[in-house]
Image: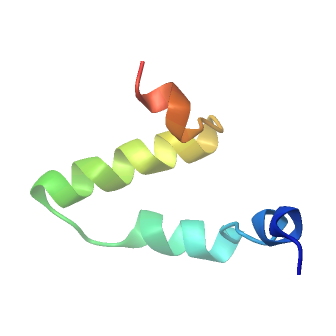
Amino acid sequence: MKEIDKRAEIYLTDEEIDAMYDMELTGENEIVRDIFLLGYMFTYGTKEWNH
């Protein structure tokens, strides 16, 4: 399998995102999850988080 094909297969399903949202977390874990989900919703890549 070509490297470009592998990249196309890496994603989270809606069910996985919903499961992350529904997780009962506290403290720093909750904050990290929320920031991740905001980035996901606004389709930020990792490069954007560094600015």
Q: Quadrant of the C terminus?
A: top left
- Residue at x 88% of width, y 81% of height: 1
- Residue with the most extreme left position: 27
- Residue at x 62% of width, y 34% of height: 42
Query: Residue 25, percent across and down?
Result: 22, 67
Query: Quarter-wise, where is residue 50 in the image?
Result: top left
- Residue at x 77% of width, y 63% of height: 7
Query: Residue 44, percent across and down?
Result: 59, 35
Nearer to the camera, 43 or 15: 43
Nearer to the camera, 15 or 48: 48
Left or right: where 49 falls relative to 41: left
Residue 48 drawn above or below residue 33: above
State how the image is colored.
Answer: rainbow
Residue 1 drawn above or below residue 18: below
Residue 48 drawn above or below residue 2: above
Nearer to the camera, 42 or 21: 42
Left or right: where 14 falls relative to 44: right
Residue 32 drawn above or below residue 35: below
Nearer to the camera, 15 or 40: 40
Count of numbered circles on the image: 0
- Residue with the most extreme top position: 51
Left or right: where 27 falls relative to 50: left
Query: Residue 17, percent across and down?
Result: 57, 66
Query: Quarter-wise, where is residue 49 in the image?
Result: top left
